[in-house]
Image (spheres, rainbow, N blue to C red):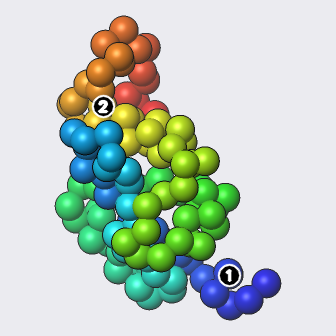
Amino acid sequence: MSDTQKAKRAIGLKYEGGDKKNTPKVVAKGYGDLAEAIIAMAQETGILIHEDPYLSEVLATLDVGQDIPESLYYVIAELLAYSYVLQGKIPPGWEGIIKRIDFEV
């Protein structure tokens, strides 16, 4: 395993909904100290931080500005929807599900 693979990594995604042509994009990516800075900035601004070594390994292969691959749409959609719920927004179709979410986790 290389030093880059061992180092902490962070990948920032952004999704601007509204148009079906818009897809989540990689907007930040870094390892080590840069990853720590990305995470700190996300924490300061209230952005959802999700730790998943397998997902971050796949996302780390993408370049900043690149759309996420279609194979990740479902998992990223779940994370975006959960992020909306944490912000008090209810994604379309989640009206019944919202009652079953444990917000104390």
Instruction: Residue at 43% x, 61% y: name it.
Output: 67
CB-based contact (under 8 Å), mark 1 and mark 2: no
Q: Answer left or right for 8 relative to 1.
A: left
Q: Residues within 10 Å of mark 2 (few under 14, many from 20)?
A: some
Residue type marked 2: Val
The correct choice, above or below, for 90 with respect to 37 in the image is above
Q: Which residue is mark 2?
A: 85
Residue type marked 1: Lys
Q: SS for tag 1? A: helix
Instruction: Residue at 22% x, 30% y: name it.
Output: 89
Is the N terminus in the top left, top right, bottom left or bottom right quadrant? Answer: bottom right
Q: Answer left or right for 49 relative to 70.
A: left
Image coordinates of residue 45 in percent, x first then y, are: 20, 61
In the image shown, does 13 or 1 lie closer to the viewer? 13
Q: Which residue is mark 1?
A: 6
Q: Answer left or right for 71 relative to 19.
A: right
Residue 62 in view in this figure: yes
Instruction: Residue at 30% x, 21% y: name it.
Output: 92
Residue 86 in view in this figure: no
